[in-house]
Image (cartoon, grey):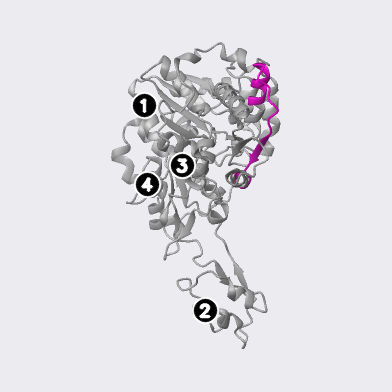
């Protein structure tokens, strides 16, 4: 369950309205009236007044259009909606009702910055002066001072979130790895990501060949009756030229990365995977000494995009999945031939709703991936696929792999590698716990989706990775950066 669950309805309504008007070609003329349509008034729905609600909607609309919500844009795909963030407590230390307003005033005496004063019924903390040292909380004999760490700050694995003097959260672009873990942890819905919705709709309307590419993590997210065939039918109904499951890209990445691992193992070099863009961002921004240890193999998303562009040079490719950091890979990594756009499940469903298209149960007669490529969306899936490929090609090695599941394990593994103390030969890095199936924009919780996912993948045929790739012209494009 997301912390912003009650806000999600508003987010989805904004996505839908923008998509609807973009298809109609009336977004330019109706954009400024959308906040009034969604918040008609006179009674506010979720904030103090309709004017604040409308300003929040206006900033959300800008995000949906792929713009920063305010006047300044630092280039980050993840942005803070300042008007929504203003309701969060300013101070990290708060005096509770346990305060006895005692005579000793240990809290006041403990503060070296003059940030705490005696009040009529309890002590008061000045958030402007407070340095968050915590000495007042330690000194209080009644444990009356509580530490409140903002959910967004707690969720960030790289300490990229701070506050300005007005208490508005600030994301440090230089530290942020674009994982998106902060987005749904904010109970005010004050953090969001820029979308490609308008760009995708314009491409669909342009007459270009537009291909939908669906993440391997998708199977099971919408129940065991929603198959890859279901998605293929829905995407064609929306207007996409065709559809490809990116589990095929998982097989492509497996083959390329497997050859890299075999060579690195012989040379005694340690390597990391490269398919999780948040993990790659973590390496580049927080462990730059290890840049050369990252595999040069492109992600499954990029592999499928390059395959399509080799065959259809002017086509437009759209990746769909639960991952926010894929937007970073698409917009910021500058990898030639990569996806032109990335949509989350809520964003593609807004497009589908605007076109009156629904996902419908279908027999799964469509498969372009081995079961190993399909499992790329699970933590440990990349390792399992690579070891299987090495077995199929007679390159078996006695390698050990750290399957880093979640940001904390990724950081620990990279720190060990940096200091030359990593016992394993390779690191498989997945910043989201559980892998891509645990992505911040997943539709269903992992435990609930697991049963359906296992059933769907169990129905797939057992083709080998190498046999599957023989069906594609792998020489027509490169699988390396």
Report the Cα–Cα distance between label 4 and label 1: 22 Å
Of callouts 4 and 1, which one flags the residue occurring earlier in the amino acid sequence? 4
Residue of label 2: 112
Nearer to us: label 2 or label 4: 2
* Residue range of the region highlighted in magenta in the rendering: 386-410
Residue 111 spot, x, y in % from top left: 54, 78
- For the residues labelled 2 and 3, the Cα–Cα distance comes to 48 Å
Give neighbour class at mark 1: few <14, some 14-19, many 20+ (Cα, 10 Å): some
The answer to whether residue 292 is above or below residue 263 is below
Q: Is residue 395 magenta?
A: yes
Q: Nearer the viewer, mark 3 or mark 4?
A: 4
Residue occupying the far bottom of the picture: 103
Decide which of tag 3 and tag 4 comes sooner along the chain.
3
Residue 324 at least partly seen:
no
| Mark 4 vs mark 1: in front | 4
The answer to the question of whether label 2 and label 3 lie on touching residues, with beta carbons closer than 8 A, is no
Image location of residue 37, percent across then percent down: 38, 46
The image quarter containing residue 466 is top right
Would you say 362 lies left or right of 70 here?
right
Which residue matches tag 3?
13
Report the Cα–Cα distance between label 1 and label 3: 22 Å
The circle on residue 203 is 1
Which residue is found at the position 47% from the left and 54% from the top?
45
On the rendered image, what quadrant is the C terminus found in?
A: top left
How far across and down, in percent of the image, does residue 281 sit? 49, 41
Looking at the picture, does residue 402 appear above or below residue 185?
above
């Amino acid at each position: 369950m997301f912390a912003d669950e009650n806000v999600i309805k508003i987010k989805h309504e904004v996505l839908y309205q923008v998509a609807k008007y973009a298809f109609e070609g009336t977004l330019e003329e109706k954009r400024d009236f959308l906040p009034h349509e969604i918040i008609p008034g006179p009674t506010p729905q979720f904030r103090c007044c309709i004017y604040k609600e409308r300003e929040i909607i206006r900033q959300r609309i800008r995000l949906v259009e792929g713009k920063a919500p305010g006047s300044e844009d630092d280039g980050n795909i993840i942005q803070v909606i300042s008007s929504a963030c203003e309701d969060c407590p300013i101070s990290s230390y708060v005096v509770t009702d346990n305060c006895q307003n005692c005579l000793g005033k240990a809290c006041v005496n403990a503060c070296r910055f003059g940030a705490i004063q005696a009040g009529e019924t309890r002590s008061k903390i000045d958030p402007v002066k407070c340095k968050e040292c915590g000495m007042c909380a330690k000194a209080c004999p009644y444990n009356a001072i509580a530490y409140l760490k903002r959910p967004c700050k707690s969720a960030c694995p790289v300490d990229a979130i701070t506050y300005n003097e007005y208490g508005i959260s600030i994301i440090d672009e230089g530290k942020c790895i674009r994982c998106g873990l902060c987005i749904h942890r904010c109970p005010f819905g004050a953090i969001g990501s820029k979308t490609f919705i308008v760009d995708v709709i314009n491409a669909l309307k342009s007459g270009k060949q537009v291909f939908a590419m669906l993440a391997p993590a998708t199977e099971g997210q919408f129940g065991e009756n929603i198959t890859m065939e279901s998605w293929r039918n829905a995407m064609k109904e929306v207007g996409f030229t065709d559809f490809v499951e990116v589990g095929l890209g998982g097989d492509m990445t497996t083959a390329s990365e497997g050859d890299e691992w075999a060579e690195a193992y012989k040379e005694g070099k340690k390597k990391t995977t490269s398919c999780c863009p948040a993990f790659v961002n973590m390496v580049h921004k927080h462990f730059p000494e290890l840049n050369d240890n990252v595999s040069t193999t492109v992600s499954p998303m990029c592999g499928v995009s390059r395959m399509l562009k080799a065959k259809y040079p002017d086509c437009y490719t759209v990746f769909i999945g639960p991952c926010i950091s894929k937007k970073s890979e698409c917009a910021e990594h500058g990898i030639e031939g990569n996806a032109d756009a990335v949509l989350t499940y809520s964003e593609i469903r807004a497009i589908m709703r605007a076109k009156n298209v629904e996902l419908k149960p279908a027999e799964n007669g469509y498969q372009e991936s081995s079961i190993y490529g399909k499992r790329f969306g699970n933590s440990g899936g990349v390792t399992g696929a690579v070891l299987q490929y090495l077995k199929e090609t007679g390159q078996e090695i006695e390698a050990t792999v750290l399957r880093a599941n979640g940001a904390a394990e990724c950081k620990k593994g990279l720190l060990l590698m940096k200091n030359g103390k990593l016992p394993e030969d390779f690191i498989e890095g997945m910043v989201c716990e559980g892998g891509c199936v645990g992505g911040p924009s997943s539709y269903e919780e992992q435990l609930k989706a697991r049963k359906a996912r296992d059933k769907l993948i169990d129905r797939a045929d057992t083709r080998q990775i190498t046999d599957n790739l023989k069906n594609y012209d792998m020489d027509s494009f490169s699988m390396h950066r």
